[in-house]
Image (tube, helix red, strand yellow):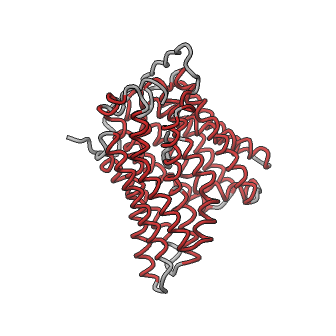
């Protein structure tokens, strides 16, 4: 009988969930308050903030694979602990920032540490959880993270209400402490033995794995949904629709609660690479439909009609998001060699950094500048990337010497060279 509840069953998976819940609490508060902290307390301009964060995530995209490789060679638990501490230190730098230079240093350290930490945690999950349970456990982690972000956002809301430098600094201090607490929880998990070094093997084999790189690229395109509810839709609602402004918050709450309640159930439908590719294909269709609905929300002058269409669009978006997540996790884990999970997850995870880096600028120009046509172009990109994932998965399977074994057990090691980004993960 399937396990019920927010957390996975007792064991290493629950320890991983506890660590991610801890730092999600701090991150939720940080995400709500960071923009006002940097402008009102540090004294930065919007341009400086955007530049610093873009450079930080760009650096994270570059170092994700080497740090994942380090997790493979030194053991993912120890590397994850060190990178959680490094993330805490990065938030500490941001807390002490009084100039653009210090802020930039903190943003660079934060982007690098976060990207590496994600890769190391994924490698640790792969080492501690049997292959046929990884996608389900990853779904539990996603639900846990969303719950933590929601609670953290409420704490951040209290700081926004106070609107004082002390309140904003307290939020960043909580975030820094949350990563230290996560490091402690990670250190208590069982260790995973480092992968053996094979003479003559390339150090970063994932960079030569073209089928896997193609899947990472398609996943990155799909992850462009990430800035929608946090940035694009609020601006669209205020500037192009008759809906009330407060609906932006309602859509975010709907998204978060739906993922908390439904992500694990959705992920149970994925039982191999074939079903994973099918999930991603349907995710593309749902995201196309959601884009069409968002475009239609600008028609008419009735606020109630606009609100109803926006709620439909948000429901389609979160359904696509959950199906994409479940399929993407299975693909990212299942096609990565067992002894290179760190570097492969680091490479696959660059999609998140890229989406955070280029998504806001790209989608602002495409959707807010192009209107209905821009929404339909974006939806078409989602549908095309989703449809292309199935053939790309089959190509990647054929490129592995153990393709037959991989088809029977997607998490089994693939001998030979062969990415994932995960949301909000």
Quadrant in the rendering for residue 88: top right
Q: How many marks?
A: 0
> Between 188 and 56, which is closer to the camera in this rendering?
56
Q: Is residue 334 visible?
A: no
> Between 352 and 87, which is closer to the camera in this rendering?
352
Task: Residue at 62% x, 71% y: name it.
Answer: 369
Q: Residue furthest top?
A: 199
Task: Residue at 70% x, 46% y: name it.
Answer: 55
Q: Is residue 295 above or below residue 32?
A: below
Q: Is residue 22 visible?
A: yes
Quadrant in the rendering for residue 39: bottom right
Q: Residue furthest bottom?
A: 301
| Rendering coords of residue 8 (x, y %) | 33, 39
Q: Is residue 238 above or below residue 108?
A: below
> Between 69 and 193, which is closer to the camera in this rendering?
69
| Rendering coords of residue 207 (x, y %) | 57, 32
**Quadrant position of the N terminus in the picture:** top left
Q: Is residue 67 above or below residue 107?
A: above
| Rendering coords of residue 319 (x, y %) | 37, 58
Task: Residue at 66% x, 50% y: name it.
Answer: 169
| Rendering coords of residue 388 (x, y %) | 44, 50
Is residue 402 shown left or right of residue 222?
Answer: left
> Between 133 and 257, which is closer to the camera in this rendering?
133
Task: Residue at 52% x, 15% y: name it.
Answer: 198
Is residue 278 shown left or right of residue 155?
Answer: left
């Amino acid at each position: 009988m399937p396990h019920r509840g927010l957390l996975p069953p007792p064991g290493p998976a629950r320890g991983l969930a506890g660590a991610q819940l801890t730092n999600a609490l701090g991150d939720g508060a940080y995400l709500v308050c960071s923009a006002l902290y940097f402008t009102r307390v540090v004294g930065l301009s919007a341009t400086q903030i955007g530049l610093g964060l873009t450079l930080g995530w760009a650096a994270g995209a570059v170092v994700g694979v080497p740090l994942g490789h380090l997790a493979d060679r030194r053991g993912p638990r120890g590397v994850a602990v060190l990178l959680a501490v490094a993330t805490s230190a990065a938030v500490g730098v941001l807390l002490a920032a009084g100039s653009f230079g210090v802020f930039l240093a903190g943003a660079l350290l934060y982007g690098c540490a976060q990207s590496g930490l994600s890769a190391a945690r994924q490698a640790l999950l792969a080492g501690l959880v049997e292959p046929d349970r990884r996608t389900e456990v990853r779904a539990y982690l996603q639900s846990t993270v969303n719950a933590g972000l929601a609670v953290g956002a409420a704490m951040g809301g209290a700081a926004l209400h106070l609107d004082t430098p002390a309140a904003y600094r307290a939020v960043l201090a909580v975030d820094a402490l949350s990563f230290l607490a996560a490091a402690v929880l990670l250190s208590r998990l069982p260790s995973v033995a480092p992968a053996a070094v094979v003479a003559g093997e390339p150090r970063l084999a994932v960079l030569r794995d073209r089928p896997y790189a193609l899947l990472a690229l398609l996943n990155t395109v799909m992850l462009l949904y990430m800035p929608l509810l946090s940035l694009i839709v609020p601006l669209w609602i205020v500037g192009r629709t008759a809906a009330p402004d407060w609906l932006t918050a309602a859509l975010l709450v709907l998204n978060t609660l739906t993922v908390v309640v439904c992500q694990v159930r959705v992920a149970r439908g994925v039982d191999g690479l074939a079903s994973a590719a099918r999930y991603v294909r349907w995710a593309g269709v749902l995201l196309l439909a959601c884009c069409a609905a968002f475009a239609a929300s600008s028609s008419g002058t009735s606020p109630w009609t606009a609100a109803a269409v926006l709620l439909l669009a948000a429901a389609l978006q979160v359904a696509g998001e959950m199906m994409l997540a479940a399929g993407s996790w299975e693909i990212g884990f299942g096609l990565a060699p067992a002894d290179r999970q760190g570097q492969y997850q680091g490479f696959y995870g660059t999609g998140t950094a890229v989406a955070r880096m280029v998504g806001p600028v790209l989608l602002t120009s495409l959707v807010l500048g192009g209107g209905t046509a821009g929404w339909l172009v974006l939806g078409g990109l989602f549908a095309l990337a989703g449809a292309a994932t199935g053939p790309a998965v089959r190509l990647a399977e054929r490129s592995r010497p153990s393709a037959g074994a991989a088809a029977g057990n997607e998490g089994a090691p693939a001998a030979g060279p062969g990415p994932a980004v995960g949301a909000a993960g």
